[in-house]
Image: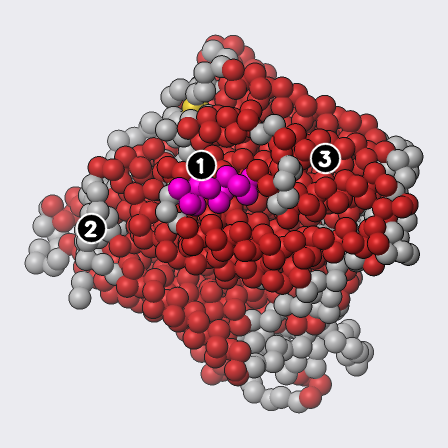
Amino acid sequence: MIALHNYLILSAVIFSIGVIGVLIRRNLIVVLMSIELMLNAVNLTFIAFSRYLGSTDGQVIVFFVMAVAAAEAVIGLAIIISVYRHRQSLDPQEMQLLKW
Amino acid sequence: MDVNLVPLLPAVQVLVTALVVTLRDLFIKDGESRGVLAFYSLVGLGLAAAEVFFLLGGRQEGAFNDSYMLDRFALFFALIFILAAALTILSAIDYVRQTGMREGEFYALILFATVGMIVMAAANDLMVFFLGLETMSIAVYVLTGMWRSNGRSSEAAMKYFLMGAFATGFLLYGIALIYGATGSTNLAQISAYLLDQPSEWPVYLIGGGFLLLIGFAFKVGAVPFHFWVPDVYEGAPTPVTGFMSVAVKAAAFAAWARILLYKLSPLDNDWVFPLWIIAIATMTLGNLLAITQHSIKRMLAYSSIAHAGYLLIPIVVGVEWGGLPLLFYLLAYSFMTLGAFAVLTSMTEGDESKDGYSDFAGLGFKRPFLALAMALFMLSLAGFPPLAGFTGKFYVFRSAVLSGHLNLAIIGVLNSLLSVIFYLRVIVAMYMEEGGAAGKSFRQAPFVYIAVAIALLGTIYLGILPADALDWSRRAFGSLE
Amino acid sequence: MQALLDQMIQEGAFAGVPKEVVYTIAMVLTAVVVLSAFVAPLAGVTSWLERRVWARMQSRVGPNRVGPQGILQWLADGIKNIMKEDIIPTAADQKLFPLAPYVVFMGFLCAFVVIPFGESLIVADLNIGILYLLSVTSLVVVGILMAGWASNNKWSLLGGMRSAAQIVSYEIPAGLSVLTVVFLAGTLSMQGIIKAQGWRPWDWFMFHNPFTFCAFFLFFTAALAEGNRTPFDIPEAESELVAGYVTEYSGMRFLFFFFAEWGNLYVIGAVVTTLFMGGWQVPPVTDNPVLLGILQFLTFFLKAYFWVFVAMWIRATLPRVRVDQLMGLCWKYMVPLSFICLLGTIGFMFMDTNSRRIFGAITLGFAIATIINFFRRVGFQFRSAKPEAYWKPHI
Amino acid sequence: MNHPFLPLLVMFAVASVIVVALLTVASLFGPKSTNAAKNDPFESGNPPTGDARIRFSVRFYLVAMLFLIFDLEVVFLYPWAIYFRHLGVFGLIQMGIFLVILTVGYVYVWKKGALEWD
Amino acid sequence: MDTASFIFYLLATLLVIASLLVVFLRNVVHCAMALVTALLLIAVMFVTLHAPMLCVLQVMVYAGAIMVLFLFVIMFLNPGALEQQRGLWWGFGTLLAMMLAGVLVPLVATSDLPADPVAATELFGSPEMLAKSLFSDYVLPFEIASVLLLVAIIGAVVLAKREN
């Protein structure tokens, strides 16, 4: 069988890739998608732990993380829409009032 | 399954109020007065406060397998949140109308955020804490961006949201690692695990603790993660800024105190040094940058970073000495900051927030009460006796000295001296310069005056007669045992 | 399936071959058989039948040239489409455009995995069966949006967006009506749901109580809308949007979309049958497992096909609804109604069996009365109009 | 090895093979003659105008948002439904609170006119 | 290498590729599609970890709902122009995140982790067991989740809906 640390390393790598996206991308939607990717990496960690600890808790937690991710996506995209109405751009660099 | 619902009372009270406000708002026609909504909110908050006092007298219990502990600690913080919410709503009544924001949603979201905060402070389970945090954060993101005709507001919301969601990722990863190491998210079980097997913890448990730390540092705006604070505070509608800088910060510190400082205290050794650096960097940078600001709102944002730095001192100091000053300082900080932001709110004219130093020029002659209050808040923030800020700082630095962190105390005092420069500048502007904005009279905005008066009373009371509050803080922190 | 294989292995049918290999080969064979001998003809014949039925209802003849009664029309169409050019417009997204039909098609095919044609005739009886079906449906939306966007055509994009909005909206009432059944069955497994019912109509969930009866109609309506069927075919409204998200597709890729649509019709029927009409449950007439299997399959197939026929009938009868009516119907009527059905069913769960049966009987009686009334009306029409062509379906 | 999802994997693989095979056959037999008119976006025979990637109304976002929230609600209802027998009245209360809170959201959205499609 | 490891490494490789595509592709819609792929692969991983229920929910909620929301917003805004790649900052950010990975990976790559999963019973990860846990140990988070969703609804309408 595959040892637990394989799963954990994988999710750490995915998490870091998500962080890359947040740091380098200038398109707000992609930044948001990268954050979703990070949350998913965490989900993978939870599920892997739950399997190897034999406790269902991890799976239930992922339930809640999905709810949180959904709420964040809803609000994040709503904010993006309202920003876009003012700026007509998705590039944080082009926001004049607030320096990034 | 134990179903003890009594401890949920304050949170449920606020939640029900929020639901009522949301629904009532839907059945008021456009153009009609929505004042009743603010009234409902305040009554609901008052009832919640009464329930908190009622519960303070009784036996403090946990609910839902002790995943929710409404002990004195949680009750203390619940009071701070309710106070902050009430003062915010009071000072926002006129502001919201003036800026054309949606009233019903504004009050409801403040109340929803308060529910999240109460849950956060009482959470004895990482998942309960996490969901409370998210409820609060999402409500506050929306509040930040609610002033839709103002481009800054939505951009501030964007920035706040991105930073917050990013921090959430780290926080959640930390929770995952802690869950993996201990097999549970319940803090009681986690701390039992930590005490059970001293020092044989897997590396990723300590790593998980650090990730939690990063998440918290983001939320309170401590230094390497502070860069969102000034812009967000500046862009957000002024009452919301006050709410953020007091309630959100207090909630984050409450969870920090319970989770990291108390329940995970066996892991302390690993993060005392990094925290020490963070604390010093936060207060110094906050104060230095505050000097260079031209807008009072932005200055207050940096000052709030600096205060996060002071608040980190008790956390570095640890459980033994840190509890009392942390709680007391948060209470004192709430009053003076909320007061300052209430005054700032009253300066708004139409769609413009008049928050530059020049706008405050001559306020001492135009609106003597507001100016006097503002002066006292500034003095208190700077730490002049006999005001709340002084007492708070005194106990914070005292705890640092007593626990042997003399260097922290010295740097803290030096920082306080530094901060006098920009706080006094406000007073100078108000009393020694002329021109500037008019501010509102009592007739134009009576509720702001009430809010300012309450905050002023609190500031003075905590400065002159701190004994009761100190006793409360001590017992509140003691209830974590 | 598994049981049968185990039995054969025990009897030494595959001596010397490792068990896993036998399983894998058996599964691959089943998959190939299911796909090529069942799903493909099913979708094809459905497309032919739909055109025939539709034609008859409109006093036309319909395709009747290829094969007896035109039944091989679908093969001819398939071969024709294979011979067609596969055009990828220059303006289209070169990567996503070819991929989109594949996604839609796969989403549809995956649904067949959990459909229980008989007690042992199921590819995989997952313990999350019905949720799996819902999740696969929601995946199709991504394919549709992909097709709409990648085509880089105004009709396609608008059609794709409308279609996606419609599918996701109607997923809510569909999910909630499924929930009423899940309540009664206490399981998500497709076989479990069927086994919780019986072969007699009054043991079906449809006639369990008035609320499930209502939930059944809600589900069927929502399923039609999710399948972009008339009266909910706004996304492909040819007078407005040419062909919606399939405007730019041609040849095989075009065929895949339509293949999925017609096949999906059968999936709808199968799910309705499973959830509300007792699935493959047959009266215990024989002990022979093979015979019983055939009987079960036929029962299931015919029940499911009945609903396919109803869908065709609806398509021939009803006009298309407007887009605002479409969304209003879903969010303002069907969502609250399905909620009420859910709550009502919960209420019935607290009722004792005997009183519950009375309500079930009333529901069944109502349904039967409606059907009888329908045939009375039809009989009246026949008697007064004396349309001779109706009695000559073979033309 | 005897995993319940294995048939799914096999089905998926076989389906992919069939799809790819069909597409290959089609590309072998189909004619390949391209010209500019054929490759243009189809706009009912008119020369295509403007960019096809037009901007859409925000109501699509609102519908998807509602769907997402209610989908989550349904997702939470499913485990509750299968376990309902063991929970009894206590479970009813739990779900009652959950549903009441979300119903407030539903009423809110309705009264705010986010369900209107025009 | 046995079958389980083979499947794991195959999935892991695909997953990393898909995630990298999310981050580095220039067209937003392509990023979204890569993310859908990544989410589906994670769902498959859930199956290998005996969490079939979570697998379908992952597909339903993430791939089916959240990503549709993303795509709708992309269509709503239609940013059109490709994002310009900016060498220096991209390199810097990547470096920073790789440093993070350099911290995180050794953190979890310790040997004191269980090598073999707990023998799974038939029930582990089944909807029943999940429901049992959810509605007895996690009642409070469940109720808070409803508040969270309500706040999200209100917030979305407040921020995105046009004023009448």
> Which of the colour schemes (rainbow, by chain, secondary structure, one colour) is used?
secondary structure
Vertical order, E86 against C109 (above or below): below
Q: Is residue B25 magenta?
A: no
Amino acid type for the residue under numbered disc 2? Pro
Task: Compute the Cα span from label 3 to label 1.
Answer: 25 Å
Residue at numbered disc 2: E114
Residue at left offset 70%, top offset 82%: D40
- What chain does mark 3 sit on? B
Task: Compute the Cα span from label 2 to label 1.
Answer: 38 Å
The reply to whether residue B146 is visible in this rendering is yes
Label 3 and label 2 in one chain: no
Local secondary structure at mark 1: helix
Residue at numbered disc 1: B323
Magenta span of residues: B392-402
Amino acid type for the residue under numbered disc 1? Gly
Residue at left offset 76%, top offset 36%: B452
Q: In this figure, what is the number of numbered marks?
A: 3
Along the line of sight, the residue nearer the viewer: C133 or E75: E75
Q: Quadrant of residue C130?
A: top left
